[in-house]
Image (cartoon, grey):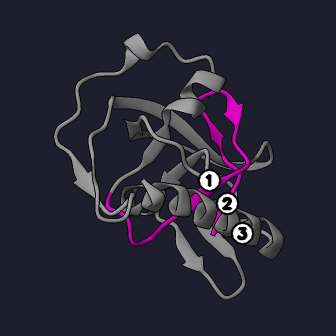
Amino acid sequence: MVVDPIVGTKHLTRVLMDGGSGLNILYVDTIDAMGIDRARLRPSGAPFHGVVLGKQAIPLGQIDLPVTFGDSSNFRKETLTFEVVGFKGAYHAILGRPCYAKFMAIPNYTYLKLKMPGLRGVITVGSTYQRAFQCEVDSCELASVVIAF
């Protein structure tokens, strides 16, 4: 499911909610576009697998950033830890199980909806099939390039 939260102070439009991921991932291109100084990154714990098929990914570091879902009438803001990676992705970021747990978010993949408690009731975050499809196409193109090397 592709959502568009506010991360830090920027509205990101291509964020994958991935219930199968144990990490929150932010791409270095995204932090550069957000104007975040790479000196803010702190050392990361360990490499991980599964983002790039058959390859180990070594993060450039970690960063804590606030993430906000909803709008001014009803929102939820939590600080998440992101692993920052130095390779390209079809998304601005990937939010995994740590995000689901912190926001107490429940996905419905059939309807591309995500629900979570907010200050004034339930927040419903939606996506579109077109945006999800375009991100999937972009992911496949990137994977083809990586496999070719």
- Badge 1 amino acid: Ala
- Badge 2 amino acid: Asp
Q: How far apart are marks 2 and 3 (CA)?
A: 10 Å
Residue name at image x 62 percent, y 82 percent: 109
Numbered circle sitting on residue 90: 1
- Badge 3 amino acid: Ala
Helix, strand or loop for disc 1: loop
Residue 117 visible here: no
Q: Residues within 10 Å of mark 3 (few under 14, many from 20)?
A: some
Q: In this view, does 38 lie to the left or right of 88?
A: left
Residue name at image x 23 percent, y 25 percent: 43
Indicate yes or no whether the magenta region holds residue 17. yes
Indicate yes or no whether the magenta region holds residue 124. no
Mark 1 and mark 3 lie on one chain; the one further toward the N terminus is 1
Residue placed most toward the observer, 27 or 125? 27
Residue range highlighted in magenta: 1-22
Numbered circle sitting on residue 113: none
CB-based contact (under 8 Å), mark 2 and mark 1? yes
Q: How crowded is mark 1: few (under 14 residues within 10 Å), some or many (20 or more)?
A: many
CB-based contact (under 8 Å), mark 2 and mark 3? no
For marks 1 and 3, give the one nearer the viewer: 1
Helix, strand or loop for disc 2: helix
Helix, strand or loop for disc 3: helix
Q: Above or below — where is 140 with respect to 12? A: below
Numbered circle sitting on residue 138: 2
For marks 2 and 3, give the one nearer the viewer: 2
**Disc 3 target residue:** 132
